[in-house]
Image (cartoon, rainbow, N blue to C red):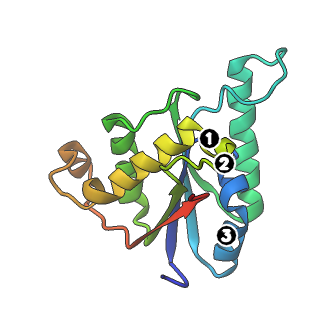
Amino acid sequence: MIEKPSRVLVVTAHPDDVDFGAGGTIAKLRAMGTEVSYCICTDGQQGGEDPSITREQMKQIRRAEQVAAGKVLGVTDIEFLGFPDGHLFPTIELRKAIVAQIRRVKPEVLITQSPERNWERIFSSHPDHMAAGEAAMQAIYPDARNQFAFPDLLEAGLEPWTVSEAWVISHP
């Protein structure tokens, strides 16, 4: 296990998943000087319980909250992919978007949610969480390191990259 990675990419389904799932780890990594970037897969529109807040407002609120929370931990590189909240699947489009972030950030370590259902703690098994985890794992291998996967990313200057380790949040 890499004790002090120089760069880490965190891939989660929703705004706030990073903070609930890996906030302490991120704080420790930043204290060691590790560069940390976030990749948030969905727009977060299904969050909250107040029906007076429109879904468009909720997207903006959750985005702003994630940016503010990131700043508290010293993370300012946050990419919001904008896939619809509640409808995330490990599609080729999601994998490609995550591969682009891996190739841009060039992390030694990628932290993501577990792609497996946890029958002991079913609420940690949100379908979007599992989809983000599965897509991230497929992006790590085989896609990000394969020069023939997504040739348009290569043409855009995003060279293949091999992630050394994957750390999993809430693994059963």
Quadrant position of the C terminus in the picture: bottom right
View extreme (front): residue: 120
For label 1, the residue is 14
Is 21 on the left or on the right of 109, as rendered?
right
Label 1 neighbour load within 10 Å: few <14, some 14-19, many 20+:
many
Please rate how many residues cluster around mark 2, counting C-alpha atoms within 10 Å: few if below 14, some from 14 to 19, many from 20. Answer: some
* 35 relative to 119, above or below: below
Q: Which residue is at 56% across, 43% downward?
A: 129
Asked whether residue 158 appears in the rendered view, the answer is no
Structural distance between the alpha carbons of marks 3 and 1: 18 Å
**Which residue in the structure is indicated by mark 2?**
17
**Label 3's element?**
helix
In the picture of the structure, the residue carrying the numbered disc 3 is: 25
> Residue 105, percent across and down?
44, 61
| Extreme-left residue of the structure | 148
> What's under tag 1, amino acid-wise?
His
Q: Which residue is drawn at the image coordinates 71% and 62% (left, top)? A: 23
Can you tell which mark lies on residue 171?
none
CA gap, disc 3 and disc 2: 13 Å
**Residue 164 in view:** yes
